[in-house]
Amino acid sequence: MRHRWRSVLLVLTLCLLALRLWHIRADFPDYHFYSQDGARFTDEGFYTGAALQHFTLGHAYVPGGWNPGVFMPVWPLMVGLLFHFTGISVTAARSLAVACIWLSVLLAYAVSRQYRSKSFAWVTAFLIAANALGFFFGRLALLEPAFVMFLLLAIYLAGRVRPGDYALAVAVGVAFTLMTLTKTTGAFVLPAVLYPIWASNRETNGSSRLASWKLIATALGTILLLLGSAKLIWFFRFREDAQIILAVNPLWQLENSPPRLLRFFFRGTWVDPVLFPLALASFVAAIVHLRFLWLDTLFTTAFLWETGYAAFIVFHYDGPPRYFVAVIVPTIWLALIFAEWLWQQHRRVGIIIVGCIVVSIAWNIASIGEYLLHPRYSLVDASIGIKQVIVAQHQANAASNELLIGRGADEISLLSGGFPAMDSDGSMPLAQKVDVYHPGWFMTWTHDPTLRQDAVGAERRMVKRAIFPDLDRTNRAGIVLYQLFPKGPR
């Protein structure tokens, strides 16, 4: 019987993972809380920008431009390597993100098996695959899929480190560095990566404890060496970009942390309306009554991961829905550990909790099904339309510049198969950027403030060429495309 239901879970998990490739080019869903996340219109272009620029402009770095790839180079490098074989393709980029999710599910299963039963590991894999938040954002070429994959790899390797395994400890440090160079929030989850090394080697005699400290020091030394070298390069070569992309205001962020922390407890239900409250309940139970849970390596690792990333969300700013993708796995682990204890010790309560989890799973899968059965391709169609307008004008007048500038221009380039594009943000003022790069085209969203449009209009004569309405149905916004000409007579 147990073998049969595991087989059912395996089939369901594989189906849900495979469905991530269905309608891979479709618009991101604009219902529920997802609609408030602007990443669906910009961030794929932001974080694949270095790869796009390499193929369309001839160089990955744009002086004065928006260059997050300098500080988070792993994802654009992965995408760029793929583009060498596929050409610029949103299908390829998003499929790479999906592949990262597949590997993450496999690694989450492997970590679970290090400390728990096969049944626990299968349920973990299924819940990750069935999570609607992870499903929707895992189909976009964002940083989170690769970030979670490298984090799970580091935790898995850390759990296998034993006295004398210094090479494996170095591998933990390398995996953590790759994770941090994928998304710079890695420092907040460092304790979750190092703790399994300590937990796997903690013993009462002093020699074993000394060995665990040496292994932790080896992993930490690798991290400091690699990331320290990167930071030196950033400081001496890319200081202006760092001030724009990595700038923080610690005093303001600390002052506003308490209300953001309260909002985090509500927004955490974006992960799952049942599993997240259950994970919070496990925190309270471990502090008040179930103190033995702190001796459970998986529980403590998940706790450090969840609280570490929560600290980032609270400190950084409120955090859009995509930020919560990074805490799906620890939320599931914590909720399952607590649910398992309730099932064993308080069967009636456990049955109620399991029933609530089943209802939540049904809601998640229904949301996924609703989305896949009614796909829209408005943003891809608009991107292709923008490219066609630009190419047609260039064919009519070969002297015209094809370069498009504007907020989200890289996203338009990615979705349409690639053409010269540059985001309007960066360390160089927009008006100066227009004079330096001489773009032939400018795009703006109808719901954006007019500051960018005014800056471009002060330097160039703008002629409206096309409007693509209703791309953002929540804000009733679309894109206006302008062709740019020198000031003066036609």
Image: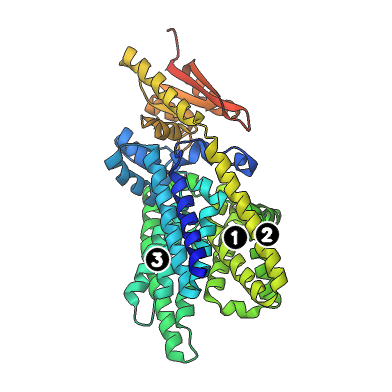
Observer able to see residue 97? yes
Instruction: Please name whichever residue, 281 or 308, is drawn nearer the observer in this view of the structure.
Output: 281
Label 2: few (<14), some (14–19) or many (≥20) C-alpha neighbours in 10 Å: some
At x 55%, y 35%, the residue is 374
Q: Residue furthest front?
A: 1
Please state the total of marks drawn on the protein image: 3
Q: Earlier in the sequence, mark 3 or mark 2?
A: 3
For the residue marked with disc 3, what is the amino acid?
Ile
Q: Which mark is residue 223?
A: 3
> With respect to residue 436, does 181 lie above or below?
below
For the residue marked with disc 2, what is the amino acid?
Cys
Residue at disc 1, secondary structure: helix
Instruction: Please name whichever residue, 30 or 167, is drawn nearer the observer in this view of the structure.
Output: 30
User: Which of label 2 and label 1 is nearer to you?
Assistant: 2
Label 1: few (<14), some (14–19) or many (≥20) C-alpha neighbours in 10 Å: some
Residue at disc 3, secondary structure: helix
At x 68%, y 59%, the residue is 356
> With respect to residue 152, does 467 lie above or below?
above
Q: Which mark is residue 311?
A: 1
> With respect to residue 22, does 257 lie above or below?
below
